[in-house]
């Protein structure tokens, strides 16, 4: 099946070829310029309106001065952030969805973090960001008496890529540095102002009218699991188990722990479905004894149909015989699954690097799961001697090692990683993925029982949380990214109070517009302050460098300015290349 990204690339190439032909035939209007897939629309209209809007020049200069202070701080922070990200990409070149080339494109449905379901709101937010950004440049041009040659919109084929203002270059070069820097920083200042306005409205009166539907919010069901076979679908809300109501996932698990192998599940839409629970492997490492989507029906001949029964059956057995639903039996070590690392404590004591080592005991303490293993080692200090018992390639081994410093993937015994679950298997007897509706609403400022009160969080930290929401699965470790109040997520929220006058769909649309407009203005403003050409940050860097060089007692001031601007710009470009390319090449 051809991916969406491939179709987009084919469309871009076809558009570029067609544009080249139209330009060759001379049929394009004068105001349309094409350069490959990039289209720019030029106009001289609107200049009188800009002149009128720029009339209170003193107020706009004050606004520009505020922006200069904010812009310089963000620009310096952006420089160090990009360099640090590049260094981390080299040290730990693990591939990440954030660094995928397609996720650089601001195209809903192609970019993994920009859902197609809110494409309209995203495009609207992007248009607002571009208009206020370039409008800021145009205003401060006229405030500084710099003529405007033309204004327009830049598109990647038909997708808005950016807006632009073409100031008179001679007018820019003849103006003083104060006017120049205010003009260059005006766009991002407007972006930040719009972002603050949108997010303040969202955090305050809008989100106050939102609530969470009581029950368990089903983000998805795992293939082949009991819930999937029972027809429980993504977007469902589970409200009861065996006739007892459940308000959240914790209550549901308590009901399941008390129930038998077959349960009656009540859904919000009024239907009741029967779920025949079974121990299904929902995750497995490549070397695990049983692979994903297989069902374990017995352990050492004892039937099991719940994870509780499975855990009890393997708890005191370092080796067990697992019977699958196909009748096949697998004998395997039961413990915490690890892979021995090179040059670590385990290899130093004779464990083969790269081999799977299933740890069944630490100093005689039983470790049936990865959690048991990490917990047992966590009670020790680096430098202590510990005794690990387990199995390597089916052979029982014992290693006495000196514990090293722990890391994110290694508890200090010298392994590449510790796999979740038992013997590299993650099992489940129900099979749903819960959607973090309560967490998302709390991060946006909603009043959610059991979640940290949002009012106690500083406003700037709230903005940071909002910025992270589309990347929540990476930044916050949640199972889903926040798409807005759309798709299945719309099933998990209610609207009340004055906001209900808009209706549920109207309230969701308003919240989505505020969120994505605020988010995109923040991203556009911050990105434009990266100090490299052709971004605003590169122009601001040049003007600041000229201002500093003019005060130094040196002759070759122009050479110094070029050295600073070119050096910083090349550092930024190189860092971006490292951030995107290194994980793809070395990860």
Image: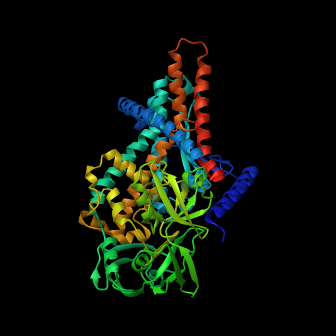
Asked if residue 39 can be seen in this view, the reply is no
Residue in the picture at 55% in, 28% down: 542
Query: Above or below — where is 232 with respect to 124?
Result: below
Quarter residue 139 falls in: top left
| In this view, 79 is above or below 543 | below
Residue 547: image location, x then y, percent = 50, 21
Residue at 58% over, 58% down? 340
Q: Residue furthest left?
A: 497
User: Compared to 542, does 326 lie above or below?
Assistant: below
Viewer-proximal residue among 568 and 375:
375
* Quadrant where the N terminus is found in the figure: bottom right
- Where residue 277 appears, x then y in whole percent? 43, 84
By what rule are the colours in the image chosen? rainbow
**Numbered marks: total:** 0
Q: Is residue 490 left or right of residue 586?
A: left
Looking at the picture, does residue 146 appear above or below residue 215? above
């Amino acid at each position: 099946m051809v991916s969406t990204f491939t179709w987009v690339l084919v469309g871009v190439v076809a558009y570029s070829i067609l544009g080249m032909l139209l330009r060759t035939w001379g049929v394009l209007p004068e105001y349309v310029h094409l350069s490959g897939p990039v289209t720019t629309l030029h106009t001289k209209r609107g200049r009188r309106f800009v002149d009128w809007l720029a009339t209170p020049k003193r107020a706009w200069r004050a606004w520009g001065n505020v922006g200069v202070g904010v812009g310089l701080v963000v620009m310096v922070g952006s420089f160090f952030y990009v360099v640090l990200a590049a260094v981390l990409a080299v040290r730990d070149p693990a591939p990440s969805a954030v660094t995928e080339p397609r996720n650089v494109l601001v195209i809903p449905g192609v970019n993994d973090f920009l859902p197609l379901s809110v494409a309209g709101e995203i495009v609207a937010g992007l248009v607002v960001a571009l208009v206020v950004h370039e409008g800021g440049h145009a205003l401060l041009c006229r405030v500084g008496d710099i003529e405007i040659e033309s204004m327009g919109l830049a598109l990647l084929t038909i997708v808005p890529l950016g807006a632009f203002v073409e100031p008179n270059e001679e007018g820019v070069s003849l103006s003083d540095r104060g006017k120049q820097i205010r003009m260059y920083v005006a766009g991002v200042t407007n972006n930040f102002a719009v972002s603050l306005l949108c997010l303040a409205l969202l955090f305050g009166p809008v989100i106050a009218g939102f609530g969470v539907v009581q029950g368990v919010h089903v983000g998805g069901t795992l293939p082949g699991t009991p819930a999937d076979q029972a027809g429980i679908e993504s977007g469902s809300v589970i409200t009861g188990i065996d006739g007892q109501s459940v308000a959240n996932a914790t209550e549901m698990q308590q009901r399941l722990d008390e129930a038998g192998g077959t349960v009656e599940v009540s859904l919000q839409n009024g239907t009741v479905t029967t779920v025949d629970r079974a121990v299904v492997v929902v995750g497995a490492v490549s070397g695990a004894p049983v692979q994903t989507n297989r069902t374990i029906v017995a352990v050492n001949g004892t039937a099991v149909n719940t994870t509780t029964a499975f855990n009890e059956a393997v708890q005191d057995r370092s080796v067990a015989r697992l019977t699958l639903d196909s009748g096949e039996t697998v004998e395997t070590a039961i413990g915490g699954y690890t892979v021995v690392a090179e040059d670590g404590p385990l290899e130093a004591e004779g464990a083969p690097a790269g081999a799977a080592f299933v740890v069944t005991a630490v100093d005689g303490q039983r470790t049936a799961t990865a959690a048991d293993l990490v917990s047992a080692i966590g009670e020790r200090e680096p430098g202590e001697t510990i005794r690990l018992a387990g199995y390597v390639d089916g052979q029982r081994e014992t290693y006495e090692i000196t514990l090293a410093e722990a890391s994110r993937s290694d508890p200090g015994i010298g392994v590449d990683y510790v796999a979740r679950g038992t013997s590299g298997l993650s099992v489940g007897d129900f099979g749903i993925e819960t959607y973090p509706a309560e967490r998302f609403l709390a991060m946006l400022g909603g009043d959610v029982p059991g979640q940290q009160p949002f009012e106690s969080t500083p406003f700037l930290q709230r903005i940071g949380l909002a910025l992270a929401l589309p990347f929540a699965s990476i930044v916050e470790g949640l199972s889903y990214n926040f798409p807005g109040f759309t798709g299945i997520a719309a099933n998990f929220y209610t609207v009340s109070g004055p906001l209900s006058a808009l209706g549920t769909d109207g309230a969701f649309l308003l919240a989505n517009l505020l969120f994505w407009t605020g988010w995109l203005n923040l991203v556009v403003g911050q990105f434009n302050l990266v100090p490299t050409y052709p971004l605003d940050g590169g122009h601001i860097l040049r003007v600041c460098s000229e201002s500093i060089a003019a005060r130094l007692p040196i002759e070759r001031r122009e050479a110094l300015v070029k050295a600073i601007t070119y050096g910083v710009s090349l550092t930024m470009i190189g860092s971006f290349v490292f951030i995107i390319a290194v994980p793809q090449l070395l990860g």
